[in-house]
Image (cartoon, grey):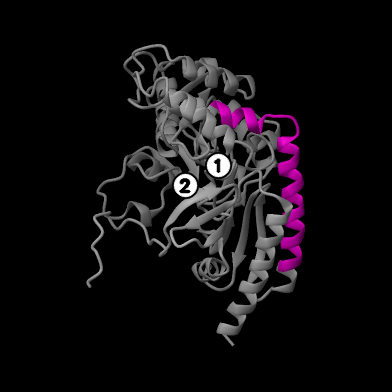
Amino acid sequence: MSEQKSHIMPTYNRADLRFVRGEGAWLETETGEKYLDFGSGVAVNTLGHAHPKLVAALGAQSEKLWHVSNLYQIPEQEKLADMLCANSFADLVFFGNSGAEAAEGMIKVMRKYHAENAAPERVTLISFKGAFHGRTLAALAAAGNPDYLEGFGPAPQGFVQCQELDVEAVEAMIDETTAGILIEPVQGEGGVRDVGTAFLRALRELCDKHGILLGFDEVQCGIGRTGKLFAHEYAAVEPDVMAIAKGIGGGFPLGAVLTTETVGRVLQPGTHGSTYGGNPLACAVGAAVLDEVLSDGFLDRVQQTATYFRQHLARLLDENSDIFEDLRGSGLMVGLKCKPANSDVVAALRDEKVLTIGAGENVLRIVPPLNVTQAEVDIAVAAIETACTKLRGSTA
C-alpha cells in the first residue's frame, strides 16, 4: 500500500510523531508512547497540557459566547487588559492572535507615534543580529535574517540591524529617520541569548536621549518564562511598547501589544484592527493563565525550579564538554550550545522520549512548562546524560 499523500504544505520538517493527548508536562502518541515535553509547543504551553484551570475557563466561555467582533464591547477582553496593565508598565492593550501579529502592531504603533507628533520621517527601526520577530514580511525585515527573506521579493524598508550588543554601535546608527529600537530581552530563535540588564538600561537611556521609542519583544520570554512576569523586569526598566504572545494563551492563539498611554493613543479607529483579536474564548483563557502565573508563590517556584535545573545542567556541561560548550538563557528559558549539530542532539533526546527544540547558533533550546516538577527535571537531565553517551558512541 502506498503512503498516503499529505495535503499540508511542507513548511516544517516534522518528526514522525502524532500526539493525541497530553497532561501536564507529558504528551502521548496515538500508539500510547509518552514523551516529556520540554519544548512546550515552542514556549507556548505555560501550564502544560490540559491544565484544569484552562480547560474550565475555555469550557465555560465556549458555552456562552465565542465571537462577536471588535465592533462591540467585549467584557472578557476588558478583564484581561485590566490584568495586564495592573501588572506591567502598560496603560493600553491591543489584542491579536499571534506573536507575529503583535510584532507588526508594535512596529506600526512606533511609526505612527512619530507621524502623529510631527515627525513622519521617523520610520526606521533598529533591531539586532539574531533577532526573530515573526514570519510576516515586516517582522522578517525587522529581524533581517536573509535566509528567512529569500524568495519573497523586496523586503519592506525602514529596518536596520545592529551586529553587536554594543551601545556605541547602536547610537552610531541613530539618525533623523530613526523611530525606535526593537529588542528581545532574551533572544529565543537567535540562540537563547540573554542580552543583559545593563544593555537594556543603556538602551532606555539612549532612547530617552534621542526622543525615540523602546520596544521589547517578549513573545517568547514573557509571561513568567524567566521567573519574572516579564524578562525586562530584571533590568528595572520599562519600554514604551511591548509585544507578547505564546505563553499568555497557554496554548490558545493569543497575542497583544502593550503600550503607555501616550504611545497607544495614536492608534485611533480605523488605523489598526484584528477580526479575531481579543475574542471571548482567547481572553477567557488568557485571564486564567495570568491568574495562575500571578498566584502566590508561582513565580518563586519557577525561579526555584530553574535554579535546580541549571545546577544540574552546569554539572552535565562540565561532564560532557565534548557535546556542550555553553549554558545560556534565563529562568526556564534554557539554551545549551552544542558541538555536534543541534538537530542531532534534538533527535537523540527524542529517542529518549524527551522533546526539545533547536535554535540559532547551534543551540539546544529547552523550555518546559512553568509548573514542571523537580522530578520531571530529573528525568530530563538523566535523558540528556544518556543522549550524550549515545552521541559520543555514534561518533567513536
Front one among 331 and 78: 78
- Read off the residue under disc 1: 184
> Horizontally, is 329 left or right of 164 in the view?
right
Front one among 35 and 246: 35
Q: Which mark is residue 132?
A: 2
Q: Is residue 257 visible?
A: no
Residue 361: horizontal and vertical position, in percent?
A: 53, 61
The residue sitting at 68% across, 36% down in the picture is 228
Front one among 64 and 224: 64
What's under tag 1, amino acid-wise?
Answer: Glu
Q: Which residues are magenta?
A: 287-316
Q: Are marks 1 and 2 in contact (CB under 8 Å)?
A: yes
Q: Which mark is residue 157?
A: none
> Horizontally, is 200 left or right of 147 in the view?
right
Q: Secondary structure at mark 1?
A: loop
Which quarter of the figure is the N terminus placed in? bottom left
The residue sitting at 24% across, 64% down in the picture is 4
Check disc 1: other Cα within 10 Å, few if <14, some if 14-19, many if 20+. many
Q: Secondary structure at mark 2?
A: loop
Residue 362: horizontal and vertical position, in percent?
A: 53, 64
- Would you identify the image quadrant in which residue 268 lies? top left
Residue 47: horizontal and vertical position, in percent?
A: 59, 41
Residue 96: horizontal and vertical position, in percent?
A: 41, 29
Check disc 2: other Cα within 10 Å, few if <14, some if 14-19, many if 20+. many
Residue sitting farthest toward the bottom:
396
Q: Is residue 357 visible?
A: yes
Front one among 348 and 187: 348
Residue sitting farthest toward the front:
32
In the displayed structure, 359 sits above or below 85; it is below
What's under tag 2, amino acid-wise?
Answer: Phe
